[in-house]
Amino acid sequence: MKLKGKRAALLVEEIYNEFEVWIPYYRLKEEGVDVTVVGSGTATTYHGKFGVPIQVDRNAADARAEDFDAVVIPGGYAPDKMRIHPEMVTLVRDIYNQGKVVAAICHAGWMLVSAGILKGRRATSYVAIKDDMINAGCLWEDSEVVRDGKLITSRKPDDLPAFCRTLIAVMAES
């Protein structure tokens, strides 16, 4: 429980990747992190690609960057839905601008693009959005995890062990 007292926002929307939500959720809780599931506000329950539901604790409009030490953005197709909600994009941008941990996996790079936080930063993503990341100014790498300061990115569910290890290590440093 080396992260007891730390707080993380876990963003969700419809068609999230179950692995990329539930594995970081339970790994962070196992380390003592208070995890708040934050939705866009369109529902109180969202469903993953395989239909697994998740209840939100708070809507993005009611979430403030000051309330969290980190934000975790899972992939699936949810990030494409998340980024049309200004409150979700603002939350990510504000957490980043406050020098806190921002962790994104797979298609979650779309949220980083929309938040405008990739210019000159090293990152990775699912290969299908590589061009979007590069066009946003990212120095894209094909690696299981890329850490650039407090920005942590991974490519796909197979990268979750490295993603979670790096997320926990960076949160422990903060």
Image (cartoon, helix red, strand yellow):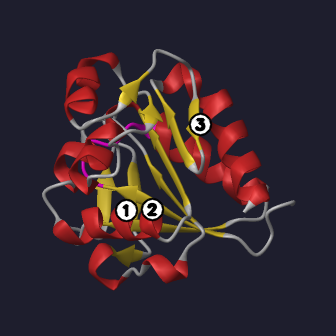
- Looking at the image, is 139 positioned above or below residue 147? above
Q: Quadrant of the C terminus?
A: bottom right
Q: Amino acid at mark 2?
A: Tyr
Q: Position of residue 118 (x, y in %)?
A: 34, 43
Q: Quadrant of the N terminus?
A: bottom right
Per the image, is 16 magenta?
Answer: yes
Discs 3/1, front: 3
Q: Amino acid at mark 1?
A: Val
**Residue ID for mark 1:** 92
**Which element type, helix, strand or loop, lies under badge 3?**
strand
Which residue of the protein is positioned furthest toward the front in this rendering?
Answer: 120
Q: Residue at x 53, y 81 (%)?
A: 67
Q: Residue at x 46, y 15 (%)?
A: 142
Identify the mark at residue 96; answer none if there is no mark: 2
Contact between labelled residues 2 and 1, with CB atoms less than 8 Å apart: yes
- Looking at the image, is 46 positioned above or below residue 77? below
Q: Callout 3: 10 Å neighbours few (<14), some, many (20+)?
A: some
Q: Position of residue 18 (x, y in %)?
A: 44, 39
**Residue ID for mark 3:** 147
User: Of callouts 3 and 2, which one flags the residue occurring earlier in the amino acid sequence?
Assistant: 2
Which residue of the protein is positioned furthest toward the left in this rendering?
Answer: 84
Q: Amino acid at mark 3?
A: Arg
Q: In the image, 81: left or right of 164?
A: left
Gap between marks 1 and 2 measured at Cα: 6 Å
Out of 45 and 86, give the one closest to the viewer. Answer: 86
Q: In the image, 101: left or right of 91?
A: right
Q: In the image, 172: left or right of 83?
A: right
Tell me where the magenta segment starts and ends, as one range.
13-18
Q: Callout 2: 10 Å neighbours few (<14), some, many (20+)?
A: many
Per the image, is 14 magenta?
Answer: yes
